[in-house]
Image (cartoon, grey):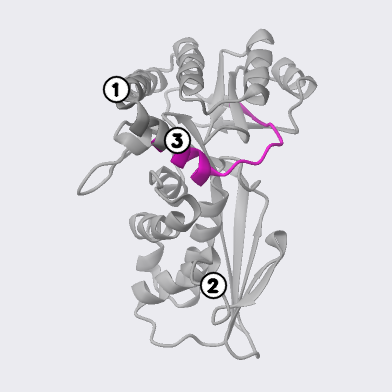
Amino acid sequence: MAIVTATACGKIILFGEHAVVYGRPAIAAPLTLLRAQAVVQASTVAGVCLLAPDLGVHTTLDAADADDPLAAVLRHFAQAAKLAQWPDLTVTVHSDIPVASGLGSGAAITTAMLRALAAYFALPHLANPPQLSALTYEVEKLYHGTPSGIDNTVIAYEQPVYFMRQQPQNQIEPFRPAVPIDLLVADTGIRSSTKVVVEDVRRRWQADPIRFEQIFTACGDIVAAARQAIEQGNLAELGQLMTYNHEWLQEMSVSGPELDVLVQAALEAGALGAKLSGAGRGGNMIALVTRETAVAVQMALQQAGAHRVLLTRIEP
């Protein structure tokens, strides 16, 4: 019985969340230690069975709702693959990426499914990064309403990217840091809906466009400076820019007490910089550390209430 397995990484936004939706740049990086896995195998049961034990999902393609994200992956793949009829299959999804925490869980699950399906049907062109990113973006609309496109991009390419949403084609520039960048990713333990937060920011922008455009522009300027600091290996400046970006995210009202407490704890323990990462109002924050300060900052974050702290490194 044919069986294919594929995985996809999570992601962290280093700079530019929310402002990226409004045409400013952002920088994101893969979180390779956290992954989603998809398994596609032939079945003796008629139809396509969708299993996601982590999410409590056990359904079929025919029975799934029109807005079911897992079913949407299959429908978009079928269209791209020009698949007239599905064979009998079971598609099983697992993920160790926390849901609703800004780590790209939805995009990772989608990308893993698409990779597994492309391999199962021997269609490698559907597994190349541009095609994966485009297909994943279509499914991201169900998760996030008006997605920036950054999650699907960094996860499909699985490398750091400088990203700007624009027409007719998004600007995507993979790049590498000059020196290793060590980050602690701390989970507040609070789940938040990216879609809800993004929609709230849009309402606030519509109510006060001049102020919010100024905020978004400030965030965009930080991204430009951060990319230069990353490419030059200037970690001290990079840390300062992270903390500065967090202050603007506070101005957007997308931070929260738990995130602010963790950011402050990291800075007091010796982090070079810290900020929320992702949609905010819960989810995760990130702290820039060195090998010498990593343990102290990790302990401080745990003492300050972090539910989980993961050390990750962005390699040159």
Q: Which residue is mark 3?
A: 28
Count of labels shown? 3
Label number found at residue 190: none
User: Looking at the image, is 288 positioned above or below residue 154?
Assistant: above
Q: Which residue is mark 1?
A: 210
Q: For the magenta stretch, what is the residue range?
A: 183-202
Is 161 situated left or right of 74 in this image?
left
Q: Nearer the viewer, residue 28 or 166?
A: 166
Q: Earlier in the sequence, mark 3 or mark 2?
A: 3
User: Percent from the top left, x then y, of residue 294?
Assistant: 68, 19
Q: Nearer the viewer, residue 264 or 235?
A: 264
Q: Is any atom of residue 175 visible in this view? A: no
Q: Nearer the viewer, mark 1 or mark 2?
A: 1
Q: Quadrant of residue 263?
A: top right
Q: From mark 1 to mark 3, how far is it between C-alphas?
A: 27 Å
Task: Say which amino acid is labelled 2.
Answer: Asp
Q: Which residue is mark 2?
A: 65
Q: Nearer the viewer, mark 1 or mark 3?
A: 1
Mark 2 lies on a secondary structure that is loop
At 75% from the left edge and 33% from the top edge, which residue is drawn? 307
At 70% from the left edge and 17% from the top edge, which residue is drawn? 297
Is 198 situated left or right of 256 in this image?
left
Q: From mark 3 to mark 2, how far is it between C-alphas?
A: 32 Å
Q: Verify CB contact (< 8 Å) between mark 1 and mark 3.
A: no
Task: Say which amino acid is labelled 3.
Answer: Ala
User: Looking at the image, is 261 positioned above or below residue 64?
Assistant: above
Q: Verify CB contact (< 8 Å) between mark 3 and mark 2.
A: no
Q: Nearer the viewer, residue 188 or 14?
A: 188
Q: From mark 1 to mark 2, how far is it between C-alphas?
A: 40 Å
Residue 86 shown in magenta? no
